[in-house]
Amino acid sequence: MKKRKRIEPLNAHLKNDLGMKQNISYGIESMTMQTAVAIYMSNIQKILKFKG
């Protein structure tokens, strides 16, 4: 339960803000790519937030 409390806000951010609610195209490869891009964008947002 302790791990889940840390992971759920990240999942909610990915789903609500970065378009992970619905897959854009079909297949496991496209879902993998969409997930990678969403995580990359999340990291870029964090970097920009810390830089100012």
Image (cartoon, helix red, strand yellow):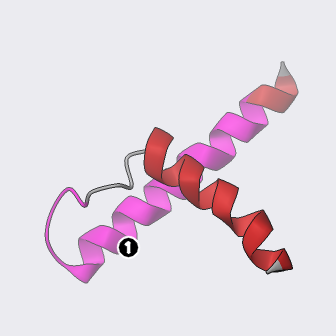
Measured from the top left, where is residue 49 in percent x and y? 78, 28
Identify which residue is drawn at 39% across, 55% down: 20
Magenta part of the protein: which range?
A: 23-48
For residue 24, side relative to residue 15 (left or right): left
Quadrant hosting residue 24: bottom left
Residue 51 location in percent, x, y? Answer: 85, 25
The answer to whether residue 14 is magenta is no
Q: Quadrant of residue 9?
A: bottom right
Query: How many numbered circles does the render carry?
Result: 1
Residue at image point 38% right, 73% down: 32
Query: In what quadrant of the picture does the C terminus appear?
Result: top right
Q: Give the main secondary structure, helix, strand or loop, of the magenta stretch.
A: helix
Q: Nearer the viewer, residue 15 or 36?
A: 15
Crowd band around label 1 with a 10 angstrom C-alpha radius: few (<14), some (14–19), many (20+): few
What residue sits 55% from the left and 44% below the top? 41
In the picture, the quarter occupied by the N terminus is: bottom right
Q: Give the image location of residue 26, x and y in percent.
A: 14, 71
Mark 1 is on which residue type? Thr
Indicate left or right for 45 with 40 as reference. Answer: right
Residue found at the very far front of the displayed protein: 1
Find the residue positioned furthest to the left. Answer: 26
**Residue displayed at 70% across by 67% down:** 7
Q: Is residue 28 magenta?
A: yes
Query: Mark 1 falls on what kind of element?
Result: helix
Pointer 1 residue: 32
Measured along the vertical axis of the image, is residue 40 above or below residue 23?
A: above
Q: Above or below — where is 28 with respect to 23?
A: below
